[in-house]
Amino acid sequence: MSTSRRGAFIVIEGLDRSGKSTQADVMLDRLNASGISAKLMKFPDRTTAIGQMINAYLQSKADLDDHVIHLLFAANRWELASTITQTLESGTHVLCDRYSFSGIAFSASKSALKHKEAIPTPSSSDIPYTNPNLSYIWCRDPERGLPAPDLTLFLDISPEAASARGGYGEERYEKAEMQARVREVFGQIGNEMLSHNQNEDRSEPTKDGAQPRWVVIDAGNDKTTVSKDMWAHVEPLIAGVDSPIGRLWY
Ligand code: NYM
Ligand code: MG
């Protein structure tokens, strides 16, 4: 890529067992095989001190207040934000397995579960949900200002199809009811991202390859079809990106 271009920041999101990690590996191999420089990252990154606290929580070896675990997930991204930025600026693409969208979706849906409330349809972008704790906006705020993905591929799968893939594991959140809530919040995030694109007139690809930032991929298909569908959106970005790195929700 030319020296003025930076790497693309590509995020893969979805429910547990939607195939994110498998597809991230496939994409990394494909990029590397073509001699394209790309780095794979994953959130939570369980190797840092904060990541170890998150790991203990997910494995039910530690109990933490819902707000605290939410902020730790966000802090885990902030401690790696400069690595993301530097990698992109050095001309290397960053593929990321989960990001801020998982942070919002899991925490906001947990709150909805705890309060046994249906998630209401948002009536304004300021107050999307009425849950007193861990509202959508509260969950989103610690993510504001993080490096924004150039493209987010949301691997969409029904909780039923996901659990048919060998059942959920032993970690917290891996239950069908919770996953159904999480999928609803991901849908809300997708709508918000897409309307943001339209406001900025970014719903059509531009000449330098900029794309709609949130793309829904049918992850119920076979592995090869999913890879192919994802690649169609990644390919326009592999020559690099001209525009500066964005920041989330600014
Ligand atoms: N998770 C992941 C969150 O609740 N918040 C976050 O910010 C992130 C990145 O952690 N069930 C949840 C989603 C998963 C769990 O992720 C562990 P993984 O990809 O299975 O290691
Ligand atoms: Mg998992």
Image: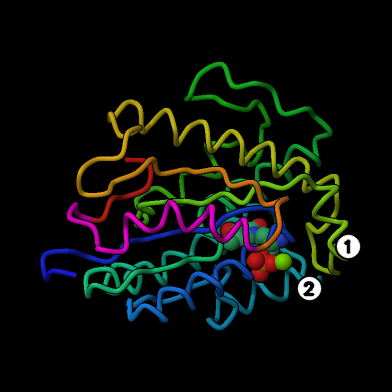
Tag 1 residue? 167
Relative height, residue 201 to residue 96 (above, below): above
Give left or right: position of 8 versus 3: right
Tag 2: residue type?
Answer: Gln
Q: How would you rate the neighbour count of disc 2 (Cα within 10 Å): few for under 14, some for 14-19, many for 20 or more?
A: few
Q: Is residue 69 visible?
A: no
Q: How would you rate the neighbour count of disc 1 (Cα within 10 Å): few for under 14, some for 14-19, many for 20 or more?
A: some
Q: Position of residue 196 (x, y in %)?
A: 38, 31
Sequence-wise, which precedes: disc 1 or disc 2? 2
SS class, disc 2? loop
Q: Which mark is residue 59?
A: 2
Magenta segment boundaries in residue numbering:
224-244
Badge nearest the viewer, 1 or 2: 1
The residue under the point 31% across, 40% down is 250
Judged from this view, the residue extending furthest toward the top is 123
Give the quadrant of residue 93: bottom left
The residue under the point 54% across, 58% down is 228
- Say whether residue 243 is magenta: yes
Tag 1: residue type?
Answer: Gly
Q: Quadrant of the N terminus?
A: bottom left
SS class, disc 1? loop
The residue under the point 20% across, 54% down is 244
The residues tagged by marks 1 and 2 sit, at their Cα atoms, a distance apart of 17 Å
Q: Is residue 118 visible?
A: yes
Q: Position of residue 169 (x, y in %)?
A: 84, 68
Q: Quadrant for ligand 2?
A: bottom right
Q: Position of residue 51 (x, y in %)?
A: 58, 75
Q: Nearer the viewer, residue 188 or 131?
A: 188
- Say whether residue 239 is magenta: yes
Q: Nearer the viewer, residue 35 or 103?
A: 35
Prevailing secondary structure of the magenta residues: helix
